[in-house]
Image (cartoon, rainbow, N blue to C red):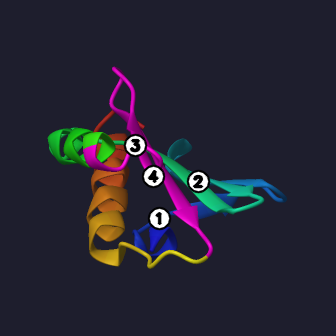
Amino acid sequence: MALACPGAEEVGVGACVSFRVQGKDFLFLYSTPLGYELKLTLDQSVAEAWALSTKQPELYRVNPRRKVFVTLRHDDPLPEETLSRWIEESYRLQLGSGA
C-alpha cells in the first residue's frame, strides 16, 4: 500500500522498515513475534483512530501528537480499507509539511 504512493521509497531492513517521501517518513513498519506494528501520523482521521483505540486498545493506540500505532497479528484479518486511507493521509501530511 505504501509503495503505491507516488515517490514513496522503502528504507531499512530487518525488524523495522520505514516508508518515506521526499526524505520524510510517513509510515514505520515493525516486525514483532506476533505480527506487525505500524506507526503513522493522522490529522483528519485521528478521531476515528481514537474511537478504535477505545474499542480495541490492544490493536490501536493514539498519542497526543497524533501518532497512531496499529498492531496487526498474523491471524487477524487485515483492515485494508482503513489502513489504505490512513497510509494515504500520513503520506499527504508529509508532502504538505515542507518535505
- Classify mark 3: residues with Cα within 10 Å, few (<14), some (14-19) or many (20+): some
Question: Which callout, 2 or 3, points at the residue further toward the start of the chain?
Answer: 2
Nearer to us of marks 2 and 3 is: 3
- Classify mark 4: residues with Cα within 10 Å, few (<14), some (14-19) or many (20+): some
Q: Is residue 73 left or right of residue 47?
A: right
- Classify mark 2: residues with Cα within 10 Å, few (<14), some (14-19) or many (20+): some
Q: Which residue is mark 2?
A: 37
Q: Amino acid at mark 2?
A: Glu
- Residue 27 in view of the camera: no
The front one of 69 and 57 is 57
Question: Which callout, 4 or 2, points at the residue further toward the start of the chain?
Answer: 2
Q: Residue at x 37, y 53 (%)?
A: 91
Question: Which callout, 1 or 3, points at the residue further toward the start of the chain?
Answer: 1
Q: Which residue is mark 1?
A: 7
Q: Which residues are magenta?
A: 55-74
Nearer to us of marks 4 and 2 is: 4
Q: How far apart in space, not on screen, are marks 1 and 4 (Cα)?
A: 29 Å
Mark 3 and mark 4 residues within 8 Å of each other at the beta carbon: yes
Q: Which mark is residue 57?
A: 3
> Which image quarter is the N terminus in?
bottom left
Q: Amino acid at mark 3?
A: Pro
Q: Which mark is residue 59?
A: 4
Mark 1 and mark 4 residues within 8 Å of each other at the beta carbon: no
Q: Classify 79 as above or below 99.
A: below
Q: Residue at x 39, y 26 (%)?
A: 63
